[in-house]
Amino acid sequence: MKKGSWLHWLSAVLVASVVVVDGAPMQIDWTRVTPVEELDHYWARLPAEMQIYRNASHHRVGRITNGQEATPGQFPYQALVLSEFGSLTSLCGGSVLSVNFILTAGHCVMLDQNTKSGGGTVIVGAHNRMVVEPTQQRIRFGRSGVFEHPQYTAADLRFDVAVVRLLSPMVFTEWVHPVRLPARNDGRLFDGLIGTVTGYGRTSDITTTFATILQFTSNPVLSNGDCIVLWNAVLVEPQNVCLSGEGGRAACNGDSGGPLTIRDGGRTLQIGITSFGSGNGCTRGTPSVFARTSFFLDWIRATSDYVDQ
């Protein structure tokens, strides 16, 4: 097993204050963010032999590395998913499926194999997450609206996909718009195409700060065979798709659950959900690994109200 491969980007964890006062927008305390890798909850689920990597990983984290700042409204399908676990709330990415549903990673709504999120807040239409922008919509979801894949496995992030049903619908605007998923008859594996990953992950390899402005980066999509050479056949399966780490460009802590997209016939197509990467660092050239959306199409459609666009 590749050293550090179990050190997934399970998101960031924060103690958040989310309130509604006289109809005012929900206010979120972003100042108490800490990496999930520093919490006992994260490490408790890993095999004993992996505990030795706990301290080794603390200074090997990064953002969407060697990427660039998005322009306002450039990625209208991007979502922030704040899932609450008691006094803790995880910060993840997601994508807009419909006015009622968000697509994200299973590990973004499951603290471990059995601890499901008790609810939380989704933010869409954001550019600067620290500001309550007029384009933003901040909408609550409850525990009953959290649907992780029934075969999700926390120990190795198999079937790492989930959908979240909102307590009230979004309003589609030029800033908030659903992403398109592959069609049922689309048998492409997408290797060789240019993939783009987006998120609010960490802003440097040496600080604990997360991106304030939405970031993105692009690289070629790898064949699973080429990805397995750099990972292994246990962690990279047909249910996964990989993005090259060429040039140190990658997703990282805080980007979990966000979309991997390609341009297809002039439109955006989501082919992956950010799942995991190497604990050895995000700029080392190791491919980012995603849940392959085409593998999970039937489950996504059956569990949400997504319809082909």
Image: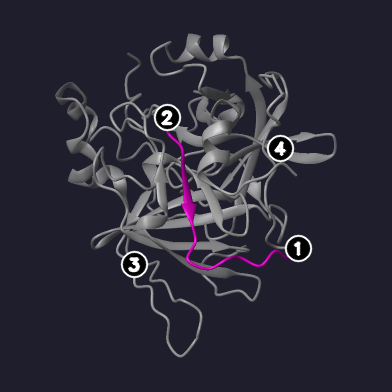
The residue lying furthest to the bottom in this view is: 22
> Mark 2 sits on what residue?
159
- Is 94 colored magenta in this rendering? no
* Amino acid type, residue under disc 4 in the picture: Leu
Between the residue at mark 4 and the residue at mark 3, the CA separation in whole angstroms equals 32 Å
Mark 3 vs mark 1: give the one in front.
1
Numbered range of the magenta stretch: 160-174
> Mark 3 sits on what residue?
16
Q: Earlier in the sequence, mark 4 or mark 3?
A: 3
Provide residue 189's location: percent of width, then percent of height: 66, 19
Q: Earlier in the sequence, mark 1 or mark 4?
A: 1
Between the residue at mark 4 and the residue at mark 2, the CA separation in whole angstroms equals 20 Å
Mark 2 vs mark 1: give the one in front.
2
> How many neighbours does mark 2 have within 10 angstroms: few (below 14), some (14-19), or many (20 or more)?
many
Residue 117 makes an appearance in the image: yes
Q: Earlier in the sequence, mark 3 or mark 1?
A: 3
The residue lying furthest to the right in this view is: 266
Front residue of this view, candidates 255 and 293? 293
* Amino acid type, residue under disc 3 in the picture: Ala
- Main secondary structure found in the magenta portion: loop
Between the residue at mark 2 and the residue at mark 1, the CA separation in whole angstroms equals 32 Å
Quarter in which the N terminus is drawn: top left
- On the rendered structure, is 255 left or right of 265? left
Q: Tell me: residue 78, above or below residue 157.
A: below
* Amino acid type, residue under disc 1 in the picture: Glu
> How many neighbours does mark 3 have within 10 angstroms: few (below 14), some (14-19), or many (20 or more)?
many
Question: Which secondary structure lies at badge 1?
Answer: loop
